[in-house]
Amino acid sequence: MSATIEIRDVAKIFRQFSGMFSAPRMVRAVDGVSLTVPAGGCFGIVGESGCGKSTLARLILGLHPASSGDILVDGRSLMAMPRRERARLIQPVFQDPFSSLNPRRTIHDIVGLPLAAQGISGKETTKRVHAMLERVGLRSEMAGRLPAQLSGGQRQRVAIARALVLGPRIVVCDEPTSALDVSVQAQILNLLAELRRDMGLTLVFISHNLAVVEHICDEVAVMYLGRVVEHASTDALFRAPTHPYTRALLASVLTPEPGLGIPDVGLGDSYPDPANVPPGCRFHPRCPMVTDVCRTEIQVPRRVGERVVECMLA
Amino acid sequence: MSALLEVNGLRVRFNEKAEAVRGVSIAVNKGETHCLVGESGCGKSVSALAVMGLLAKGGIRTADTLSFAGQDLRGLTESQMSRLRGDKMAMIFQEPMTSLNPAYTIGSQMAEVRLRHRGGSKREALDRAAALLGRVGITAPGLRLGQFPHQLSGGLRQRVMIAMALMCDPDLLIADEPTTALDVTVQAQILRLLMELQAELGLAILLITHDLGIVARMAHRVSVMYAGKVVESASAEALFAAPTHPYTRGLLDCVPIPGKIARGAQLGSIPGTVPRIPLGFQGCGFRDRCAHADASCATGVPAQSRAPGHDYACRLPAGWTTEQAA
């Protein structure tokens, strides 16, 4: 019982105020992304801050309307779907469990809110909340506590319980473990993997931590300045990264193996600005393999074997 | 040879209820990177702040030894300490935006460090700032000197912080999570820069981090902290080849390593969370989360040595890891 997500040429443009007398800047946060997330899969989206991965997550959740393009779940457009129905289908888990939980509500109220919004009775809500808390590894006595009385890991479990209490088919996790310590991160990753298996969820997993993505995802899309520059199965991507940006990203993963030193990622000190996208290939100012053609010619996604790469050199 | 920075029996408490650091000993030699690693709340940042005399108000520091370049830091007054900080002992912090003053240009902030500690003219100080910005890999340093912190990206700001730390040729650089706020590609660039500078200038670096990947790649020596104590201390090779304290082992099992751990396999994890340690706490701080704890762990923790320079604080014999595997 899972759902396929089809993202069709989606773009999201934000207008950024830049002073009373100047024209607003257009930030193309997501700029023509097409992806298919298979049912029951765990789909990873990686990239640096500002690459548009969180905006894409919010588009999939229906929190932002897309500027153009469409997102379909099982063939039905998300935009056309009523909010309540969408909430039963897709739920989020956000990065920071300190700010994503209302500090003045009890855990029971926080986890029960999606049920209340669907018009489910108080008694039924309490029953389901307790069952869900147990399911994510919290004792049901926790229901009476406030978020401030919980540790970071426990709060993230509460956020997961809230996401799953309606029995959604898709869960979008935006950096779910970045704010947590490593020992707690491992607990949460194990929990997500287990829940996905048991409940047949489709997971969209957004992270900047490539080691975590490699561990949990089946497929990975690498984003750079609003575009997907490489998309492949996790095995293919990690075994033979093809886009120069993917290579740099993989090279900068520091595994706990002493003696290897710090790799030279060769990206220079320029930094991408989504309001000021370079002409030609977006990655060319930082690319170690740049040629003259890259500076002028816009890149299009190409299928290379099992993967899709947006680089003419691949 | 005595170490450049030598700390023995460092204790810090902020109130009568809890002790943040409970007897930490670390030594950092010239040209060496010593990593303090642990989870949030283990006392690693507080230890570093205590060494620099930068504890928040109400923090009480005691130590058996606290010496820097042969000088006892315990008896120094605040003004003597502030002459040392930023001069021979420099530091960089996690979030460069909050450590730079948003109202002053990069150039004036960098020059101030030099003028305050070494005097000389503003012109000379700015020239030195420009040279150092170039050294840390910033293109067009002259332009950057006139810019404000908000005009730079996170990676550039951290490079500015490093250049600023180098203004007075320090002997010791204390870096508290210097790359945690940065993207992975930028993190690799910044860490590589620190290693180059160390080789070039013979810097001693005390690096505080929670990332075992950074520890493995950067450290000469490692001290693993838990609940205000160093639970294991060794050279980086020895620590990763033979982690001995149950906490160190648990921590290493938690990290997914591409190609080493099968995809989707259970990651190791440590049950429970970091405890708060009350004043006068006895025994091992890790015992509530440890699978090997017994009654003796509640009363005392023996300090043991696995090999010369590889010490750990646990009742288990050094060979327990191999016995368990057999």
Image (spheres, coloured by chain):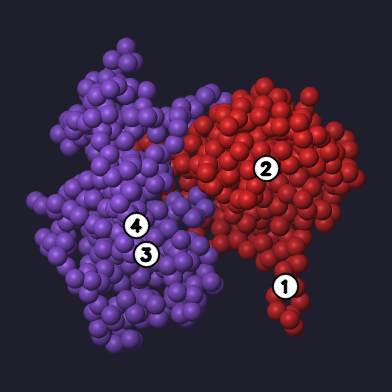
Chain colours: A red, B purple
Whole-angstrom CA distance, mark 1 to mark 3, is: 33 Å
User: What amino acid is labelled 1 in the image?
Assistant: Phe
Which mark lies nearer to you, 2 or 1? 2
User: What amino acid is labelled 2 in the image?
Assistant: Ile
Q: Nearer the viewer, residue A51 or A303?
A: A51
Up the image or down, A270 lies above or below A45; here it is: below
- Give the crowd class for mark 4: few <14, some 14-19, many >=20 residues within 10 Å: many
Which residue lies under the disc numbered 4? Answer: B175
Q: Quadrant of residue B175?
A: bottom left
User: What amino acid is labelled 4 in the image?
Assistant: Ala
Quick check: do tags 3 and 4 share a chain?
yes
Which residue lies under the disc numbered 3? Answer: B162
Question: What chain letter is assigned to the residue under label 3?
Answer: B
The quadrant of the image that shows the C terminus of chain B is top left
The percent position of residue A244, horizontal first and vertical second, equals 58, 48
Which residue lies under the disc numbered 1? Answer: A17
Find out whether the residues at labels 2 and 3 contact each other: C-beta distance under 8 Å: no
Q: Is residue B308 left or right of residue B264?
A: left
Identity of the residue drawn at 33% across and 42% down: B277
- Disc 1 is placed on an element classified as loop
Find out whether the residues at labels 3 and 4 contact each other: C-beta distance under 8 Å: no
Which residue lies under the disc numbered 2? Answer: A110
